[in-house]
Image: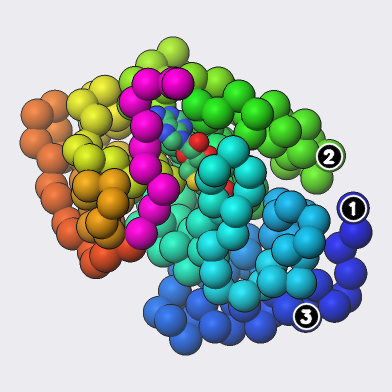
Amino acid sequence: MKDTAKHQGLRNQLVTLLEQKGITDKNVLEAIRKIPRHLFLNSGFEDYAYQDKPFPIGAGQTISQPYTVAFQSQLLEVKKESKILEVGTGSGYQTAVLYAMGAKVYSIERQNELFKSTSLLLPKLGIRPKHLSFGDGYKGLPNYAPYDGIIVTAGAPLIPKPLMAQLKIGGRLVIPVGEESRSQIMTLLIRRDETRFEKHELGEFRFVPLLENKN
Ligand code: SAH
């Protein structure tokens, strides 16, 4: 596994593009500048790793487009030591970006194949999430709750109640909401108190579906 000056140059170009597309959080941009996205893709796609596009990662899943990763990460307002839950570990790229931003990351994945391969990959790259879990992210990860932020990286038909319950007061939940065949609306919920959540809708995106049951 190699990260070369050429890859770094391509990452710098990608960061410039993300800035042009409206990403302003320096912490997000520096994390994307640092994380070698090409090492999260199946070999063969290496050359495309720094284009702003999603790619297949096996098990019928995709690594999100860099702009989407940046947009969701920015909405989380991650601070050093923020406790963040990610639903849909997938390739681990988003996990790595959050880790590079200084977050304590908890992540859950329902596809065993991806869970296993990503659990092996991340430590090899020096990326140390607090906990990687295999299971159904609709339920969140109650053992480690509450979280400063929760990011869902698959399209959900509705906002799972357990995720809302696992947010700290002031915490932020970033989730694409919509029917699986169509596009989803990026939704930000900010928890104001025990019962009140402020909702913001932030445009259309397209994700693979958040699946409830394993088949
Ligand atoms: N964050 C990932 C994106 C992967 S795509 C990355 O950067 O690569 C979305 C992921 O969500 C897939 O890996 C899919 O298997 C997973 N997923 C779908 N439904 C899920 C659920 N209910 N619980 C946990 N993970 C789920």
Q: Main secondary structure of the magenta part?
A: loop
Question: Dot 3 lies on which element?
Answer: helix
Question: Dot 1 lies on which element?
Answer: loop
Where is mark 3, residue-wise?
9
Quarter location, residue 39 = bottom right
Where is mark 2, residue-wise?
124
- Furthest residue in direction top, as rendered: 143
Quarter location, residue 60 = top right
Are the residues tagged 1 and 2 within 8 Å (C-beta)? Answer: yes
| Numbered disc in front, either 1 or 2 | 1
**Which amino acid type corresponds to the residue marked 1 in the rendered image?**
Met
Q: Is residue 212 magenta?
A: yes
State which region is magenta.
206-215
Please give left or right for residue 111 compared with residue 161 in the image: right
* Residue 52 locus on image (x, y percent): 55, 73
Whole-angstrom CA distance, mark 1 to mark 2, is 9 Å
Does 142 sit above or below residue 56?
A: above
| Numbered disc in front, either 1 or 3 | 1
Q: Residue at x 78, y 80 (%)?
A: 9
Q: Tell me which label, 1 or 2, sits earlier in the chain.
A: 1
Q: Is residue 39 magenta?
A: no
Q: How is the image coloured?
A: rainbow
Where is mark 1, residue-wise?
1
Does 103 sit above or below residue 4?
A: above
Residues packed near mark 3 inside 10 Å, few (<14), some (14 to 19) or many (20 plus): few
